[in-house]
Amino acid sequence: MMFAQDPLYAGDWLGDALITGLKVLVAFAFLLVAVMLNIWFLRKVISDFQNRIGPNTAGRWGILQSLADGIKLFFKEDLIPDNSDRFAFKLAPYLSLVPAFLVFAIIPIGGDFNGDDGDGVVSIFGHDTLLQVADPPVGVLWFLAMSSLAIYGVMLAGWSSGSKYPLIGSVRASAQMVSYEAALGLALASVLLVSGTLSTHAMVIDQSGEGPAFFGIENILPAWYLLPVGIVPFVVFIIAGTAELNHPPFDLVEAEQEIVGGFHTEYSSIRFALFFLAEFMNQITMGALLVTLFLGGPNGPAFFFPEGWWIGVFWFFVKLMGFLFLLVWVRATLPRFRYDQLMDFGWKLLIPLSLGWFILLAFIQIGRDEDWSTAQFVGLGVGLAAVFVALAGMLTLAIRNARNERIEEMEDAHG
Amino acid sequence: MAEFITFFCGAAIILAGAIGVVVARNAVHSALFLIQTLLGVAVIFVVQEAHFLAAVQIVVYAGAIVILFLFVIMLLGVDKAEDLGVEPIAGQKPLAVVLGASLLATAITFVLVATDGATGVGSGDPERQLDSGITDIERIGRVLFTEYAVAFQLTAALLTIGVIGAVVLTRSLSSADQLDDLEPASMDLPSLAPEGANDEHHVDTVEEDAS
């Protein structure tokens, strides 16, 4: 039996169990502290955007504000509406929180990937292991599985509250998450086409070292997947990921002006805090996944090669902070989408765009495998593009034709 | 040892979930127990090193199909506890007992017959052996895109046709009122003049119906 690829599991079982338990504990504690700091970071940065001070009382620079809020939420009265389905109402916060935590298990957060033997293996108390909780062979599929389970939390919370606004919020949320998961999956597929593996650990190893030469200058570009995969899946992943997080400008789920608080309207006290925790935890794991898939994970820039596992952790956090700052920036800048805009954007723009890019990448990949010359590339590319344009034209024509016929029919029937 | 413990935990999860599906009075609770069963089966798949199958089990069954169940249950409002004394179909309960017993008998027969082998060990092709060192993902991918490529693409086409067919069937445009649904209700379109002068495909619906 093999749960995951990790040199740890070759050793004695007691040591394995202890170190695995330690890693789980560290990951859990890290996520909790990171959420606390993330909320503080969000409030501080957004108050800078809005030209005000933000939290400044609890601790230095107000850094303990989220801790104080958390303690307050713990001691508030826990309300369960009479009209609610008690079992589902109590279950829903956990169904949000647990997947949020579990996704982080596949993220490599550090390790030394430099040099020829850089495989990211570190030694803890004499046991060789990886700096990630688990490295299952299904890798990023685990992320897709968990994010599809996360819908249950939102959906059940809205339904079990037994009132209208939460139900509207949860229906919005599930439709949005299902729609954008498609675009997210397609962006992910582009990465998988280049990586040839699902395992996050193998991906990070593949992205270590030097990338291609930049106009003849070696040792400048990193070997991150962002370069071979291209900018389109990267941007699609960020947008679809933001929508998946129900983060502004995609926060129709809890649009205060329309549906009070959305799915968590009826929640208070610690159950509300659990939803909040899950939301911010998801931001961190989404950022960590983006860093792993496109930005080389713990790999630093190609020209900077100090030794040691801590440098991986350092670069990982620098990139993660970049993503979290981007989220705050977007939150402070963009107004909320309208519902039809949201659906149009997901289905009519993001999905065709990422699907088209996926086909392009597959074309290039086949060309490389078959050793095509430049002339072959251009010729086949033009031919393929012509076929696509012809098909798209035929489809447009057919749609227009059918539409005109329908209008005529209706005019006959009613005119 | 670890396999033994994990198997028993997984089996306990599956059984508890399965009993819950039957016993729960509320349809939503039954669906939740069904998810528990599916997750337990995913654990057993991982024990058998069928990682891909486990992931697909969660993504497709727990993440998509049961979500659809829940949507139907919640939106149709059949989420109230039902009176189990009423039989909607006559003779349903004895038939269910017979069907359940025959399923159980089939399962037991399989277990008795397949105690040794039946896991692909005997097959001559090394790629099909479970112990060949290739991960299950690679093996499934290779088989799916070589041997079963045509069947795979036909399935994809079938699913697409099914989706389009569902949309066509549910959106029957018998009355002119529904024509407006073809256009997304978008606020950035210019609003219609009372006579509909600035709409080139204008159909006189409201006025005609009113007269």
Image (cartoon, rainbow, N blue to C red):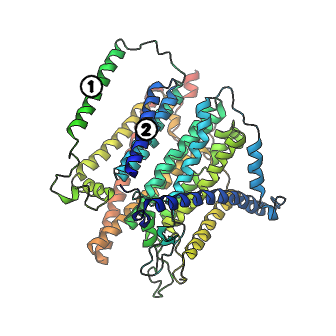
Disc 2 element: helix
Q: Chain of mark 1?
A: B
Residue at the spot of label 1: B102
Q: Is residue B111 left or right of residue A305?
A: left
From what the image shows, is residue A116 above or below residue A271? below
| Residue at (25% x, 37% y) in the render | B111
Q: Position of residue A232 (x, y in %)?
A: 49, 64
Disc 1 element: helix
Of pointers 1 and 2, the one earlier in the residue sequence: 2
Is residue B191 visible to the viewer in this orientation of the structure? Answer: yes
Q: Residues within 10 Å of mark 2 (few under 14, many from 20)?
A: some
Disc 1 residue type (three-letter): Ser
From what the image shows, is residue B180 above or below residue B175? below
Q: Quadrant of the C terminus of chain B?
A: top right
Q: Residues within 10 Å of mark 1 (few under 14, many from 20)?
A: few
| Residue at (27% x, 25% y) in the render | B102
Which residue, as the protein is rendered here, is positioned at the far right?
A: A57
Q: Position of residue A367 (x, y in %)?
A: 30, 71
The quadrant holding residue B155 is: top left
From what the image shows, is residue B90 above or below residue A368? above
Is residue A411 visible to the viewer in this orientation of the structure? Answer: no
| Residue at (22% x, 36% y) in the render | B112
Residue B12, label in figure: 2
